[in-house]
Image (cartoon, rainbow, N blue to C red):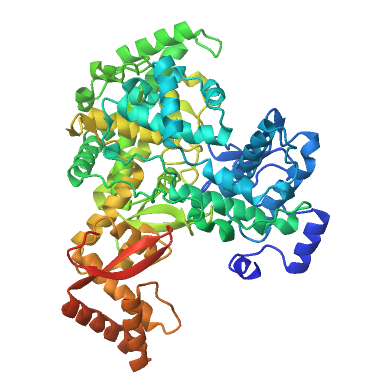
Amino acid sequence: MKNEESAFKELLNHNEEDKAIAQEDFPKPRWMINNSVKDDVWTLARTGFPLSNEDRSGKTDSLSFHRLIAPGVYLTDSRYITLNKDIRNSILYLNLIGRITRPLRGRAILITATNLVLHANELRHKNNSPLIINLSEITIDDIKDYLLSFSVTQIEFDACLNIIHGSYTKKSDVDWEYIQTRLAVTTRKLKSIKHKVTMYLSKNYVPFRSLIWEKREHFQASLDNVHFSLDPKEKTISNTISQIESLYVAKRAQKYKFSHSAMTIFSSGHAVFKTMLEPQKTKLIPVDIALHSLSNSLSFVRRFGPGLREYASNLMSNEKRLISHYSYTRDTSTHLLKKLQDELFSTTNQPSSLIDLNIVSVRNLDYGKPFNKWKDGLTFAQAISLYCAAMWIILASFSAGRSTSLRSLRRDCFICSPIDGLFDLKIRIPKSSERFDLEEVYRPIPDIIHDYGLEFAALSCELEKWKSEITQDTEAYLFNQLLSARAVHSYSHTKRILYSALTPLGLDTANSYICFFQDWIDSPTKNGERWYPSTHQFRRLFAVLYFNFSHDLGLEELSWFMGHAHLDQTFHYAEISPTDEWLEEAKRTIARIASNLHKQINSDETIKEIVTNARAQTNVSTVLEELVHHMIEEHQKNTGQEVRFHRIDGEDIFFYFSNAQEEQ
């Protein structure tokens, strides 16, 4: 176990660690915002957002120990104080030895631990057996049965489907507690059945689709041809086993020790399940759809950006005049304020550049159901929503930024270098996949994107003057709460209370704006379905297009631009479309690895034999690299095989030879 822990950064030396365990006095994790580790609810920092800000709205998560562990029994109940302590101390110990660097990892371990206990106790309750009250009482069979509850049998699926078809006509009517009783299954098993059944129903029956689809004109095209199976996902099982394994790793901190190594016993799930669903990459958005979205985004910000900023300024000035004229105060009735907003719209000059937007109101008109009512005319807030979506799509397309990176952009992110006059986007990316800190980096952008960005930031400033307190551009978020529909519709006399540029726009809100934009621009449909892309789909498309269009550049440049810690991560994107350029890069990567005499290569036996033979001929790295590359090409000529690669368990890249005609 010691060897496994050595790869992680420990917070204390071994003597201090022993003392902390003995006294149960663990240091407070730096990602914890609440005052005490003994609190039943922990406030957790979110990735990329500072802890020092007093206004933490939208910037924190929570971890609650008040979780069900048996029918009618909670972890915080006095009888279960030792179980509570052991799970709590396990999380703190894992943080201490560097096993938890992201707060949501701690929450995931808590959820899995309590769900495991709940599952076992529900079965014990059913059989009138004594309940588990300590981690030491959990058996291997308990863990195995818990893992098996992630799978769904055809009989269970059909039984649930028959109950729903016989009793309910839409998703919101389904009584899942009743179904759990009818099927006589545990809570964990019900979650698995519910997930599979709702997935099936949402694809095949409109009334059972999520409410989010009521806000879209079409069904999600990227879900087309998604393989439906009752098998559990390999990644879900692997993550669950990893979280259970964490309890074993933390046994030093437990009074009643958890004694089973789930990873050793169950081998990432392959010892439990015959088949599991392999990880599916995010579907690659068709190039024509992506370019249609990007083209319309660029057109939108160019045509309407300056006009929307000017209009916001005009509305602010006129509203101040009207409030003063009518002597309105904070106590003025909502009815009068709605009349004020109607008068504000009718008496404020609208820039001629906005005519094609067809803005018909500056207040909420309860648009939403049916969602296509916006075709009768936009509210000012809806126009701002479209502007946000357009800017988001542009930055996602040109920066290949993650959602967190885009959300955490500051208003001063558009930079012109005083040295060379070129333009950059100051963006924050994860230091590694295991840390919640972000580091500030600069990524090149075209000059026109820089100018569009400054215009968008200027609108944010205008809304801030109108709806909130003035903040520094270094602290304000580019995509901030003031751009939300509620903030734009709000009455100015409530400023400094509800909305702030110091709070980032929610990711769900940003995604809803992108979906709205796709409908508004009438994005092409196929078989009545439309692409509503995610930020990650723009990121993946960037990777494929970049490499395919940069024949003289290698993988390293792309890896740097995307903020990958290792080239293996970038190869993961290459698997989408392994062109000749990617395959040549794979050969070069094998050669580079081989040139390091102390590094092992993850490959089939043929490639290992080539590397071994080459290393036997020379130990000069520069000569060795070219020799391995030459020997690979010789093997290809002699056999007709090609180098291929794929990702194993979501981590390492495995290189192998395959017949050229075989599909990747």
Place of residue 50 in the rendered image (x, y in percent of width and height, measured from the top left) = 56, 47
Against 1, residue 598 (above or below) is below
Quadrant position of residue 606: bottom left
Residue sitting at the far right: 23
Q: Residue at the spot x=72%, y=43% of the render?
A: 35
Q: Nearer the viewer, residue 522 or 427?
A: 522
Direction from residue 519 to residue 166 in the image, left or right: right
In depth, the one of 218 and 227 nearer the eye is: 227
Q: Is residue 418 visible?
A: no
Instruction: Between residue 530 and residue 505, name the one nearer to us.
Output: 530
- For residue 633, above or below residue 135: below
Tell me if 379 is positioned left or right of 34 in this view: left
Locate the N terminus and report the quarter of the image it occupies.
Answer: bottom right
**Quadrant of the frame with the C terminus:** bottom left
Q: Who's the residue at 41% across and 16% down the image?
A: 166
Quadrant of residue 185 in the image? top right
Work out whether 338 lies above or below 203. Answer: above
Using the rendered image of the protein, determine whether residue 549 is visible from the camera's viewpoint: yes
What residue is shown at x 48% (from left), y 47% (from top)?
236
Q: Residue 350's spot in the image, x, y percent?
A: 26, 21
Residue 308 at x, y = what percent? 30, 29
Is residue 501 shown above or below 595?
above
Residue 33 position in % (x across, y down):
65, 44
Residue 159 sits in quarter: top left
Q: How many marks?
A: 0
